[in-house]
Image (cartoon, coloured by chain):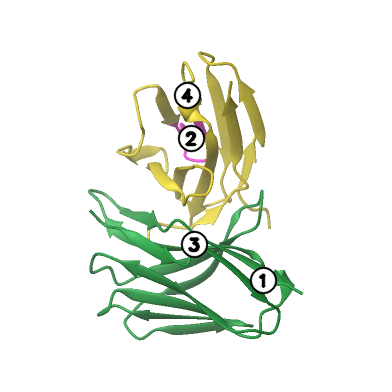
C-alpha cells in the first residue's frame, strides 16, 4: 500500500516568501505529525493532529508557522515570510490511531531559504 | 526536560565486525523506538521496545531496553555494507493531549567492505 507522501520534495524560497508544504498520510491514519529536521540532527516536533483537530502546536517556532488538516486527511504546513533559519527538512508522519502507535514517515521536504 | 543522547554520533567499521550503539534518556519513559534513515530518504521504523528487559531482533540488528538504567542498545552483528545508514532512537514523553517523540541526534554508521 501507499506510504506517506510529501510534496514538493525540494523547495527553494527567497527570504520573505511564503511557502506551503503538503503531506498525504497513509489512508485511514488518524494521527498526523509534523517535524523539523536540521542537518545532522534528529527530528524536532512541530505539531500534531488527531483527525482534523490540531491538539498540540507547542513545537511551532513562531507565529509564522501554521498547519492545518481541514478534512482529517491531507495536511499543509505553511510558513510565512520565510527566514534563513527556516531552512531544514520538514518531515510528516502518520500513525494509525494515537501518538504511541508507530509513526510512519514521509520522505520529507527540503526547504532552502536564500 | 527529557533528553535523549546517543553515542557514538559517528561510527565507521569494517564488514563482519560487531558493534553497539547506545541510547540514554533522562526520564522514566517505558517505550523506546529505533529508526533508520538513509540519505535523502524517509525514517524507517526498526523496533518498538515496550517494557523493561524487552529484546527484539531483526536480521543482524538486535535492540534491548533497560528502563531502570534508562538505556537502550542497538547491537549490530557481523556488519554488512547495506546496514550503512543513520540510526535514531526516540522516547515518548506525555504531553497535554498526546505523547511526543523526543529524538536523539542520530548515529551515522558507515560500514566499509
Specify whether B106 is left or right of B91.
right
Q: Mark 1 to mark 2: distance in Å?
A: 39 Å
Q: Nearer the viewer, mark 2 or mark 4?
A: 4
Q: Which of marks 3 and 2 is in front?
A: 3
| Residue closer to the observer: A104 or B64 | B64
Q: Mark 4 to mark 1: distance in Å?
A: 36 Å
Which residue has dot 2 on it?
A: A71
Of the numbered discs in the image, which one, if any, rests on residue B9?
3
Q: Mark 3 to mark 2: distance in Å?
A: 40 Å
**Chain name for mark 2:** A
Q: Do the residues labelled 1 and 2 touch (CB within 8 Å)?
A: no
Q: Are marks 2 and 4 in contact (CB under 8 Å)?
A: no
Locate the C terminus of chain B by quadrant: bottom right
Q: Is residue B71 something that shows in the picture?
A: yes
Is the residue A80 above or below the residue A11 in the image?
above
Of the numbered discs in the image, which one, if any, rests on residue B83?
1
Callout 3: 10 Å neighbours few (<14), some, many (20+)? some
**Chain name for mark 3:** B
Specify whether B42 is left or right of A67.
right
The quarter holding residue B78 reads bottom right
Q: Is mark 1 on a helix, strand or loop?
A: helix
Which residue has dot 4 on it?
A: A79
**Chain name for mark 4:** A
The green one among the chains is B
Residue in the image at 67% along x and 53% along y: A2
Q: What element carries label 3?
A: loop
Residue in the image at 68% along x and 71% along y: B111
Is the residue B81 above or below the residue B59 in the image?
above
First in sequence: mark 3 vs mark 1 = 3
| Residue closer to the observer: B46 or A75 | B46
Q: Do the residues labelled 3 and 2 touch (CB within 8 Å)?
A: no
Expressed as whole percent of the image width and height from the top left, the position of residue A61 reads 36, 32
Amino acid at each position: 500500500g501507499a506510504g506517506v507522501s510529501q510534496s514538493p520534495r525540494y523547495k527553494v524560497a527567497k527570504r520573505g516568501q511564503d511557502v506551503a508544504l503538503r503531506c498525504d498520510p497513509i489512508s485511514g491514519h488518524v494521527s498526523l505529525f509534523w517535524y523539523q529536521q536540521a542537518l545532522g540532527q534528529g527530528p524536532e516536533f512541530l505539531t500534531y493532529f488527531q483527525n482534523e483537530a490540531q491538539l498540540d502546536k507547542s513545537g511551532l517556532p513562531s507565529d509564522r508557522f501554521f498547519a492545518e488538516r481541514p478534512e482529517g486527511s491531507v495536511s499543509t504546513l505553511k510558513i510565512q515570510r520565510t527566514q534563513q533559519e527556516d531552512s531544514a527538512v520538514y518531515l510528516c508522519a502518520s500513525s494509525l490511531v494515537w501518538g504511541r502507535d508507530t509513526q510512519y514517515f514521509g520522505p520529507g521536504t527540503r526547504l532552502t531559504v536564500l | 526536560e527529557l533528553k535523549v543522547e546517543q553515542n557514538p554520533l559517528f561510527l565507521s567499521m569494517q564488514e563482519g565486525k560487531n558493534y553497539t550503539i547506545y541510547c540514554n534518556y533522562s526520564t522514566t519513559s517505558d517505550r523506546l523506538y529505533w529508526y533508520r534513515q538513509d540519505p535523502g530518504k524517509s525514517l524507517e521504523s526498526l523496533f518498538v521496545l515496550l517494557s523493561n528487559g524487552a529484546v527484539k531482533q531483526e536480521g543482524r540488528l538486535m535492540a534491548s531496553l533497560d528502563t531502570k538504567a534508562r538505556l537502550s542498545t542497538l547491537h549490530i552483528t557481523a556488519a554488512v555494507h547495506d546496514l550503512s545508514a543513520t540510526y535514531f532512537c526516540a522516547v515518548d514523553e506525555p504531553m497535554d493531549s498526546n505523547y511526543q517523540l523526543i529524538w536523539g541526534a542520530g548515529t551515522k554508521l558507515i560500514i566499509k567492505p
